[in-house]
Image (spheres, grey):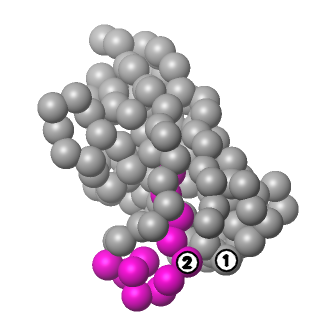
Amino acid sequence: QVQLVESGGGLVQAGGSLRLSCAASERTFSTYAMGWFRQALGKEREFVSAITESGGRISYADSVKGRFTISRDNANDTLYLQMNSLKPEDTAIYYCAAVDNYYRFIRQLYDYWGQGTQVTVSS
């Protein structure tokens, strides 16, 4: 049972950058596929980005493609999301999530979630 803790959120102006981190509690981190999700006030949670166990496969939502970069450091059990050219519509609570079952992963049924970190982008 992996524990996930996000950090790195904050308040930035439009056009600015933030790097989010997600620290995992277990050394089995390298066996999990990981994802970033976000939820804005009054809206449903949406997918942002995902990365496979080894980092060889990456996907992004169209809304963040070209601006956000997902990466992982398995040696330090940490997932990252570099966010550039931030827009007010990126304002949300950002969550990292993990899944260690292939069949759940391909259905985006993540099993483990962090508590989230707030990102606020002002115009």
User: Which residue, given by chain and number where applicable, does mark 2 sit on?
Assistant: 100
Contact (Cβ within 8 Å) of mark 1 with mark 2: yes
* Amino acid residing under circle 1: Thr
**Disc count in the image?**
2
Give the position of the C terminus as an image quadrant.
top left
Q: Which mark is residue 31?
A: 1
| Residue 121 in sight in this render | yes
Q: Looking at this view, name the residue that lies furthest to the bottom.
A: 103
Residue 123, compared with residue 7, is above or below; it is: above
Which mark, residue 13?
none
Q: Position of residue 56 (x, y in %)?
A: 61, 76
> Where, by quadrant of the figure, is residue 28 drawn?
bottom right
User: Which residue, as the protein is rendered here, is positioned at the far front?
Assistant: 1
Whether residue 14 appears in this view of the structure is: no
Left/right of residue 23 with respect to residue 63 in the rendered view:
right
Going from N to C along the chain, the mark reached first, 1 or 2, is 1
How far from the left and from the top, in percent, is residue 113?
Answer: 48, 54
The region drawn magenta spans 96-107
Q: Residue at x 33, y 55 (%)?
A: 47
